[in-house]
Image (cartoon, rainbow, N blue to C red):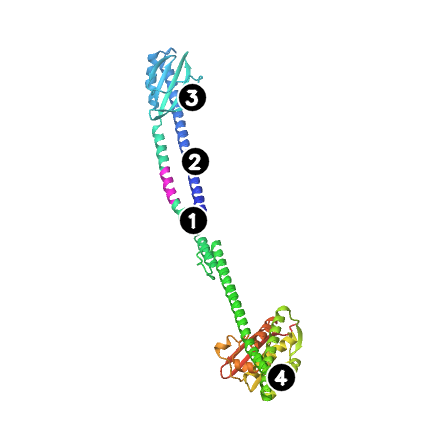
């Protein structure tokens, strides 16, 4: 059963029950109070009649001998004190009888009054009956008070309540229906959105229409949906990157392996002269070196994923003295000027890995064809040290700049292969910087050069 139906039925049960119970209690109490009040009023009038009758009887009856005619005269005089129909019995003789047929006469103990509500011919009466003894005679008095108008008023009140009850019930039914619809609308939207997400429509969102718990639930659902979309996009990106990685790896290994096998076959068949053999061996060696560089980079990436890093405090001046010793001979061989401006500082790094990052950046500048490279190390803020490697090479286009960190991606493939490049340098450097909790940012202007900034934590202890 849907929650809308449960909610609607629940509201209707509460509404009908509360209206019935409260209406019943109100009407019943009102009718009872009205009837009790009318009975009290009838008893009061009856007592007045009895007192007047007894008083007039004392005054009118002489010699203390009551005879029927004298008593009838007393009754005639006294009955003006009440509007009731009366019946008076003197011993066993009925002196006056104008009460409706069906009103019973009860012979009570002297002085006691018995009353009851009687319905006769669609009319209601309060019947009061009592006995008293005077002058040796027993008088029985019966009075019937017509309370039909009071009962009719009560019936009108009851019918009015039924009309109000029906009106309130209709209004309550409509209210319960639309209220249940409104209250469960966000839940229906959540259900529809959940089905859409399960069908692959990630990131599906719902409009928040209230500030209550359902509104909070909707906001939470939207956040969850957005998170799912982001995660799915990330998974799709990872899958695409892996597919690109495999495709690029297959492509990168196919070309050198084809060259190696082809030239090795020529040498094996001994169809080349000495110069051709030397040239073929050179191609084989060159392609082999490129495969070696590729395998080394791949091993570095795999080892980074399988093992952590061990940070230690390293002095930047000492580190760059070591880097100079490695870089300068290669730069001089290419007639490239390398400028260093290093602020002395202690940084938290894995020395070998971080040196690999810097060497990769410098090596990229050398391979790009720059004739001047600047390396600047300076404090970026209180907790961060900045290392910037700048060159005046050909730069990188905006399209290529977005993908330079992807594995196997090379801006100039022909030059990279000539230099035994594998397109893994920046990908490896970026992974190492992330493992250090730092960052690697690249900015470049085509035709003017490239700047790469590394940000790393300094010793803050």
Image coords of residue 423 (percent x, y): 55, 77
**In this view, the mark in front (4 or 1):** 4
Q: Are the residues tagged 4 and 3 within 8 Å (C-beta)?
A: no
Quarter of the image with the C terminus is: bottom right
Residue beneath the point at 43% across and 49% down: 180
N-terminal-most mark, 2 or 1: 2
Q: Name the residue that disc number 1 marks.
A: 180
| Main secondary structure type of the part rendered in magenta | helix
Q: Name the residue that disc number 4 marks.
A: 327
Front-lying residue, 62 or 372? 372
Direction from residue 371 to residue 167 in the image, left or right: left
N-terminal-most mark, 2 or 4: 2
Residue 165 within the segment the image draws in magenta: yes
Front-lying residue, 268 or 2? 268
N-terminal-most mark, 4 or 1: 1
Please tell me in which quadrant of the rendered image residue 47 appears. top left
- Dot 2: element: helix
Residue 375 within the segment the image draws in magenta: no
Q: Name the residue that disc number 3 marks.
A: 114
**In this view, the mark in front (4 or 3):** 4
Q: Are the residues tagged 2 and 4 within 8 Å (C-beta)?
A: no
**In this view, the mark in front (2 or 3):** 2
Using the image, determine if residue 269 lies above or below residue 238. Answer: below
Please tell me in which quadrant of the rendered image residue 119 appears. top left
**In this view, the mark in front (2 or 4):** 4
Q: Are the residues tagged 2 and 1 within 8 Å (C-beta)?
A: no
Q: Name the residue that disc number 2 marks.
A: 25
N-terminal-most mark, 1 or 3: 3
Residue range corresponding to the magenta coloring: 161-172
């Amino acid at each position: 059963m849907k929650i809308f139906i449960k909610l609607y039925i629940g509201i209707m049960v509460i509404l009908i029950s509360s209206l019935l119970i409260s209406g019943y209690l109100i009407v019943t109490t009102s009718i009872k109070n009205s009837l009790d009040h009318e009975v009290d009023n009838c008893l009061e009038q009856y007592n007045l009649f009895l007192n007047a009758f007894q008083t007039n009887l004392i005054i009118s009856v002489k010699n203390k001998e009551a005879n029927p005619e004298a008593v009838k005269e007393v009754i005639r005089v006294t009955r003006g004190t009440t509007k009731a129909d009366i019946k008076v019995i003197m011993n066993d003789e009925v002196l006056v009888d104008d009460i409706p047929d069906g009103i019973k006469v009860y012979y009570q103990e002297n002085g006691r009054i018995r009353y009851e509500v009687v319905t006769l011919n669609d009319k209601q009466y309060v019947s009061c009956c009592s006995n008293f003894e005077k002058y040796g005679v027993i008088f029985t008095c019966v009075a019937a008070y017509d309370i039909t108008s009071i009962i009719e008023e009560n019936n009108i009140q009851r019918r009015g309540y039924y009309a109000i009850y029906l009106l309130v019930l209709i209004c309550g039914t409509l209210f319960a229906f639309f209220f249940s619809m409104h209250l469960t609308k966000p839940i229906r939207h959540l259900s529809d959105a959940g089905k859409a997400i399960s069908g692959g429509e990630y990131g599906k969102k719902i409009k928040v229409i209230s500030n209550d718990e359902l509104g909070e639930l909707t906001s939470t659902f939207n956040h969850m949906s957005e998170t799912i979309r982001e995660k799915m996009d990330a998974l799709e990106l990872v899958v695409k990157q892996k597919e690109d990685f495999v495709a690029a790896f297959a492509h990168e290994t196919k070309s050198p392996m084809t060259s190696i096998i082809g030239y090795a076959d020529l040498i094996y068949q001994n169809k080349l002269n000495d110069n051709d053999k030397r040239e073929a061996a050179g191609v084989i060696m060159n392609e082999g070196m490129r495969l070696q560089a590729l395998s080394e980079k791949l091993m570095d990436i795999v080892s980074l994923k399988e093992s952590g890093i061990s940070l230690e405090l390293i002095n930047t001046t000492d580190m760059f003295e070591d880097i100079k010793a490695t870089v300068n001979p290669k730069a001089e061989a290419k007639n490239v000027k390398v400028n260093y401006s290093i602020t002395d500082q202690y940084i938290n790094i894995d020395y070998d890995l971080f040196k690999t990052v810097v060497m990769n950046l410098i090596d990229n500048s050398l391979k790009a064809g720059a004739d001047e490279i600047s390396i600047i190390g300076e404090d970026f803020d209180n907790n961060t040290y900045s290392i910037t490697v700048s060159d005046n090479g050909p730069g990188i286009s905006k399209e290529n700049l977005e993908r330079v960190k992807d594995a196997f991606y090379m801006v100039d493939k022909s030059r990279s292969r000539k230099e035994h490049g594998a397109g893994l340098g920046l990908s490896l450097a970026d992974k190492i910087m992330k493992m250090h909790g730092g960052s690697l940012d690249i900015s470049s202007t085509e035709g003017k050069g490239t700047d790469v900034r590394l940000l790393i934590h300094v010793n803050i202890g």
